[in-house]
Image (spheres, rainbow, N blue to C red):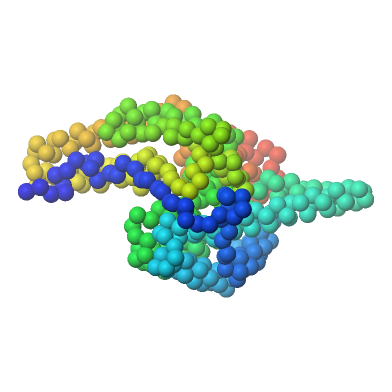
Amino acid sequence: MNSKSDTSLFETTHQGRDVQLSIDKLSKVIDNYHIDVKLSTKFSSDIKKLVALLVSQIAIPKPKHWDNPATFDKIRAEYLDMMTFLIHRVKTDLSTDEVCFLQFTAIRIILSVTKAKLDSDIESVTSRLADLRHKGSSKALATDQRLFWLKKNYDSILLSVNKQIFSQLQKVEERQLAPIRDQFLGKDYEFVVDALLNPILTVSDPSSLPLLINEFCVFSWNSEAKGFIDINAKVEALLSKRLKQFPIVTIGEDSTATIAEAEIHDELGGLFQTQTFFGPAKDTKTIIAKEFNWLECPDYVSTLFNIQKKRGLLTEIRSEHGFGAWWKRCGELKGLEKTLAAFFKMLRSEKLLAQLLSSHYMRRSLNSLIMEHIDLKTVCQFFSWRITVAKLQDGISGVTSYLRNK
């Protein structure tokens, strides 16, 4: 009798995910491109108030921990009402694809308002600085320092504000909207929530250090796309050689857009930031589609390389199917272990292993007193043994005694 335990260790690993949304029935405005969406006036207004509040709390050198329960409760309730009403429209005048597409409107307003508020604050400080310098005021120096701080921490502020709001929406998605989505949209549209609340959306640059440290790992000290492209190409080559049963489409390979075909509308600035990584995006007009191979799906990668779980499966295989089946699956497991060993060896040879690990673990070690004096790059370099304690302390007042006490 066959059972799940008798299958290959690889058969439970999905090999990709296709995403496609058709919006051909949505009415476009006069430019035949944009789609006008009427968002809840109350939600839009309260998002602006919340963003202004969060920016005022976060965009300062020594931010405190603030509790905003009443404001967050209001936003969650409004988001739930708005999304519930929209999803239920699949029963009347909208297709499932159109509903999923229109949900991005809520995310767009959050990202737009946060960026606009921070840009407005920087413009205001810049204008005030010019006026103080013109008057020869002694306050010009402090204002100049304020402007420098805002620009230096631009992405940190964006990340913190957007992430706080996204976390509230995530709660609604997990607690109240999940069953509604399942009922009206189905399992094929589970990807929508991941796309809506993708942390890459929260910053102005997908390779910014605050994003990499808080959500991913630091692949380049200079936040350059080249660092990611180089190491990614080597990872793809290694996996393609060792795991031939899992084909990999090289990143950017599926982007064949010519200059005439390329998407040019980029009001939030994200499209042009990502094309360095993924190549030019094609103007798909009415069909939004993307094919993700298994390496682009974190859950699939985790399943494939879950060595401990696969060892437990081997025990079941031997008890149910005998030594022959067990021996065959042992070979598969050994191949995975050798692939992991080769992967770590490659990272060490590229002098990246310590850097990636330190940037991953430092998020739980960050202290506001240290970060007041040292930037993220310096801390990450110290944790990965790129610089000494003396170099870390050089020119930093007030940190030496803190480090000694620790």
Task: From this view, report whether residue 244 is shown above or below residue 200.
Answer: above
Query: In the shown orientation, is residue 342 left or right of residue 130?
Result: left
Residue drawn at point x = 51 percent, y = 64 percent = 168
Task: From this view, report whether residue 20 is shown above or below residue 80.
Answer: above
Residue drawn at point x = 74 percent, y = 51 percent = 122
Depth order, front residue of 87/13: 87
Quarter occupied by residue 189? bottom left
Task: From this view, report whether residue 195 is shown above or below residue 69.
Answer: above
Q: Can residue 345 be seen in this view?
A: no
Q: Is residue 254 visible?
A: yes
Query: In the shown orientation, is residue 245 left or right of residue 47?
Result: left
Residue 42, image x and y in percent? Answer: 60, 71
Residue drawn at point x = 57 percent, y = 49 percent = 33
Depth order, front residue of 384/139: 139
Residue drawn at point x = 53 percent, y = 70 percent = 78
Query: In the shown orientation, is residue 373 left or right of residue 229?
Result: right
Residue 225, image x and y in percent? Answer: 55, 34
Quarter occupied by residue 322? top left
Depth order, front residue of 112/356: 112
Q: Which residue lies furthest to the right in this view?
A: 135
Residue 126, image x and y in percent? Answer: 79, 49
Residue 117, image x and y in percent? Answer: 68, 57
How many numbered tags mark residues here? 0
